[in-house]
Amino acid sequence: MLEAAPGDASQAPHVLREYALIADGERGALVGPRGDICWMCAPRWHSDGVFNALIGGEGSFAVSPVERCVWGGHYEEGTLIWRGRWVTDSGVVECRDALARPAARGVAVLLRRVIAREGDARMRIMLDASAGFGRHAMTDLALEDGVWRGRSGPLHLRLQGAERAHTTASPAGRHAVAFDLVVAAGATHDVVLEIAVDPLAGDAPRPQALWAATQAAWSADVPRLPEAIGERDARHACAVLHGLTSADGGMVAAATLGLPERARQGRNYDYRYAWIRDQCYAGLAAAAAAGRDPLLDSAVHFVSERLLADGPGLKPAYTVDGKPVPDERELPLPGYPGGTAITGNWVNGQFQLDAFGEALLLLGAAARRGRLDADGHRALVTAADAVRRRWREPDAGIWEIEPRDWAHSRLICAAGLTAAAEADPGAAAVWTDLAGTIVADTARHSLHGSGRWQRAPDDPRVDASLLLPVIRGALAADDPRSTATLRAVRADLSEDGYVYRFRPDERPLGEAEGAFLLCGFVTALAEHDAGDRVRALRRFERTRAACGPPGLYSEEWDVAQRQMRGNLPQAFVHALLLECAVRLGGPPG
C-alpha cells in the first residue's frame, strides 16, 4: 500500500523500477509513483538540475493524491506520454504527464493533466523549482491574471492552472507554490509549467493545443512495427530513443547521473552525454527496423560531424550539441541512496578504438539504405583511416577500463571495415584486406586454447562483448571461433537466463555486479544468427523482463533482488531491445 504523505512527496526516493520518463529530446524528467517529478535538468540534458530530489537535493514538482492510494500507470503506446493512475479510498484518478513537443532548446514545457476517472479527484500540487542543482530557490513569485511567474536563478518560470495556489515557506526560507485541488468526477484540469532561459513574453500557451501537438509529434516519430516480436515493447524502445535524441542529433546515454551500479562501491557516473558507441547502436537498430530513418539520420549526422571535426582524435563522448564533456566533479548533495552525486565524466580523456568500428558499421548501414550523403561518406573515409592508423594501440575498450589490446575493439573495427567496403567500391579491396589483417593478428594473440576468443592477449577470460563482432559480420556465425565463444558465454556468463559482461574475479556471478542487459540482447542475436531460434527467443524474453511497470531499462539487473541498477533509462539497452525484436521477427543471419 502506497500512502500519500502530503508535503513530503519530494523527499523520499523510490526504487528505480517505479520511475517513468517523460522527455522531448532536449531534456527529460523522472516521475515517481506519488506523481512527484523528482529529476530534471534544464534547459538541456547536460545543464544543472532544476528538480533534484532524486539525488537528495532541493526541488520537485508534485501532483499527488491527498487520500490513501495505490499506484499504477502506463505509457500511451508509441509515446513518452505517461498516465499515472491511483485508486484512492473514494475513486480513481489519473495524471497525464508529458514534456511538450516539438521541443525548443531554450524552453521546457511540462504538461500535467489531472483526470477524475471515478469520483472526485482530490489532489495536492506543489512546485519547488531549484536551479543550479538546488542552489537557487524560487524568487520574484507573483500571480497575474491567473498565471504565476517567478525565477529560479538564471531560469524564468511560468505556471498556469494554479490560480488558487499560495506560496509557502520552509524553515530555511525557501518558497514554493502549493494548493489543494478538487476535480469533479469526469472532469479534467491542466497544469502547465514553462522553464525558460529568457523571459517568457506574450500569453501563456493553451494546454489543448500543446497536447495536440505533442501527440502528433509522437505519432509521426513512432509508427507501427508489425514485424517485431513484442511490438508494444519495441515501439516503446523506439519512443525512448526518440525522447533521448536532441534536434542536434546527439542522443544521451541516459537521463540521469549518479545512480549507483553497486551500492557504496563508487561506481556512479553521469550519463547525460552522447557516447559515439551508443549513438551507433541506436542508428543500427533504426536501420534494422525499416522506416525508422529519422533515428538513423540523427545518428549519422551527429557521428559524421564529430568524425569530420576530430578525425583520429575522436572522443568517446560529447554533449548532445557536440561540445566536450566536462570533467568529473562531485556535487555537495547526498546522492541517490547507495551512490554519490557526480557530474561530468572522466571518459573525456580516454581512447576507445571500438568507436571507429561502430561508426563504420553505422555509416555502412546508412549507405545500404541510401541515407549517406557526401559528408557522411567523408566521415566514413575518415573513420577507416583512423582505424588504419590506430588499430594497434591499446584502448579503454567497450567497458571503459584500463588500456589494453582488447580483442573486441579490434574485431569490431574489422566488422566496420567490412561494412564500409560495401559503401565504397574504390576502397573496398584495401579495407577488406585491412579487416582480414586485423582478424588474423587478433587470432594470433587473443584466441584461447579452447578455440574461443579471449578478452586480450594477457587476459584469457571470456567476455560477452566478443559476440558483437560476430553479429556485425567480422566473422561468420558458423566460424568455429564464433560458436566456441557463444558456448563459453552460455556456460560461464549466464545465470537464470541473464548474461553478465565477464567475471571480474573469482566470486560467483552477481556478487561483483549485476547482469548486463545489453549482453542479454546481444546473446539473443548471436543465438538467432547461429540458427537456434528457441534459445534466441528465450534469451530475448528473459532479458526484456528486467524492468518495472513503466517498461524502462537501466544498465544492470540484480538477478537475486530483481532490482534495476545504474542510470535510467539506458539508451543502448533500448536500442538493442529494438534491434532484437525486429531481427528475431525475421529469418536467421
Image (cartoon, rainbow, N blue to C red):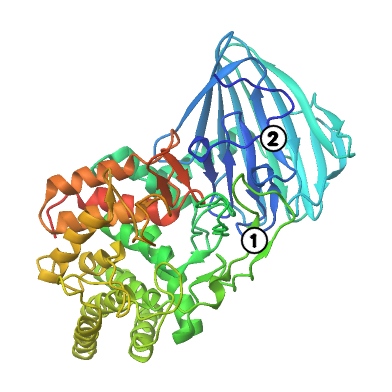
Q: Residues within 10 Å of mark 1 (few under 14, many from 20)?
A: many
| 100 on left or right of 489 | right
Look at label 1 and name its amino acid: Thr
Picture quarter containing residue 486? bottom left
Q: Quadrant of residue 437?
A: bottom left
Q: Which mark is residue 343?
A: 1
Residue 183 drawn above or below residue 493 = above
- Residue 230, given in percent of the width and then of the height, sits at 27, 39
Residue 281, by quadrant, is: bottom left
Q: Give above or below for 127 relative to 378.
A: above
Residue 417: x percent and y percent?
A: 26, 80
Q: Secondary structure at mark 1?
A: strand
Residue at 14% x, 60% y: name it.
Answer: 589
Query: Quick check: 463 left or right of 99?
Result: left
Amino acid on which disc 2 is placed = Ser
Distance (Cα) linking label 1 and label 2 = 21 Å
User: Residue at the location (67% across, 55% down)?
Assistant: 43
Which of the marked residues, 1 or 2, is nearer the chain's N terminus?
2
Callouts 1 and 2 close, C-beta under 8 Å: no
Q: Position of residue 97 (x, y in %)?
A: 56, 34
Who's the residue at 59% across and 54% down the image? 258
Sort mark 2 into few (<14), some (14-19) or many (20+) by Cα contacts within 10 Å. many
Badge 2 marks a residue whose secondary structure is loop
